[in-house]
Image (cartoon, rainbow, N blue to C red):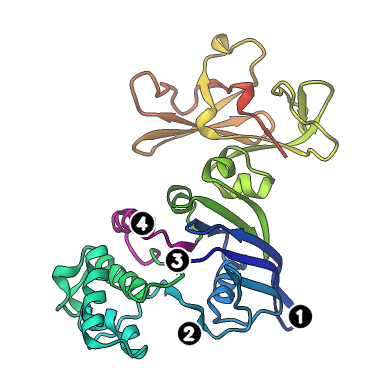
Amino acid sequence: MSAITLKNIVKRHGTLTTVNDMSLDIRHGEFIAFLGPSGCGKTTTLRMIAGLTDVSEGRILFGDRDVTAMPPYLRNAGLVFQGYALFPHMTVAQNVAFGLEMRKIDEVETGKRVMDALRLVKLDHLAGRMPGQLSGGQQQRVALARAIVYEPEVLLLDEPLSALDAKLRYEVRTDLRRLQSDLGLTTIFVTHDQDEALSIADRIVVMSAGSIEQVGTPEEIYDRPATRFVAEFIGATNIFAGRPEGAGVFRTEEGMAFALPAGAHTNTSVSAMAVRPEQVRLVPAADVAPNAPSIEGSVEDVIYRGALTEYVLRIASGGTVTAHCQNVEGGRSDFRRGDRAVATWPTSATMLF
């Protein structure tokens, strides 16, 4: 098992730069998620780490070993892709054994390793089945067993759950996190699904246009986004453009004034204020706490979403404010479409960019 170090790596396709001067230290045994929109460079970065795509500039290290120019088969990295890529004419066991046979591992050792890998993914009882007889989740676990059977130094996963339905995605990602923890494998997981990244990773690398926007724990990324891009990409966010005005006040471009947290860094580069919908409450005007940020409007939409209800408030500027109220005793608001209401939130929940 290895730590992974990316040193100023660049990938160019002609005049197009898809990964731009990216540096990152991934700790031994860490589970990292590369997260970002389509085309941001996350899969290209993974492919460079795997050796499937050449590096235009920079270096890649597995521990102290420079693998930048090394072919994939010498890097000892386990790969799982979006498509399961299972051989349809082979049994589950034969699919998992294939990589070991290519490495000339003897038959007895191969059989032992295959069953050990299948036990880890809870599929040893299906070793004799054909891929066509398995569910999508089971096929993905076979692909995972095939990636770990030869005891790789690192595990590289390129959107491995995207072909599964919501329930299966939850089940397989839970199994994946357990397996990674049990094996202590240094793992990189590429995804565009925010919930997946937040729930599975030790740290998240948020990427945009070939560059890193922020690296942090799920809590840091969600609660303290470093840029407006991160705030908008990770979860729902109410954003107001404007500037700090004096001590403790933010004035929007429409002229609305909001109180800021004590000690907020209001330097001249700040151009936006944000608050997460789950921090917003809808209350009658008479119930607004003194000095709390608040804004009045008309309830435009009420959307039931199971665990929560989403309220969309249309405000005088023409914009909207979204509130997420938990559907628990005392949590859900009683406002309906067309009602007047005030959106308010704790001053401490305000974020500045």
The answer to the question of whether label 2 and label 3 lie on touching residues, with beta carbons closer than 8 A, is no
Residue drawn at (24%, 69%) of the image: 116
Identify which amino acid the numbered label 2 is placed on: Tyr
The kind of residue tagged 1 is Thr
In depth, the one of 317 and 249 nearer the eye is 249
* Neighbour tally class for label 1: few under 14, some 14-19, many 20 plus, Cα within 10 Å: few
Crowd band around label 2 with a 10 angstrom C-alpha radius: few (<14), some (14–19), many (20+): few
> Where the C terminus falls, by quadrant?
top right
Instruction: Examine the rendering and report whether any part of residue 299 can be seen.
Output: no
Q: Disc 3 marks which amino acid?
A: Glu
Give the main secondary structure of the magenta stretch. Answer: helix
The amino acid beneath tag 4 is Arg
SS class, disc 2 = helix
For label 1, the residue is 15
Label located before the other in sequence (2 or 4): 2
Q: CA distance from mark 4 to mark 3?
A: 11 Å
Q: Is residue 209 magenta?
A: no
Disc number lying in front (4 or 3)? 4
Label 2 to label 4: alpha-carbon separation: 26 Å
Q: Earlier in the sequence, mark 4 or mark 3?
A: 3
Q: Name the residue beneath numbered marker 4.
A: 173
Residue 84 location (% of width, % of height): 35, 75
Q: Which residues are magenta?
A: 162-190
- Circle nearer the viewer, 2 or 3: 2
User: What residue did someone put label 3 on?
Assistant: 159
User: Residue drawn 18% across and 80% down?
Assistant: 130
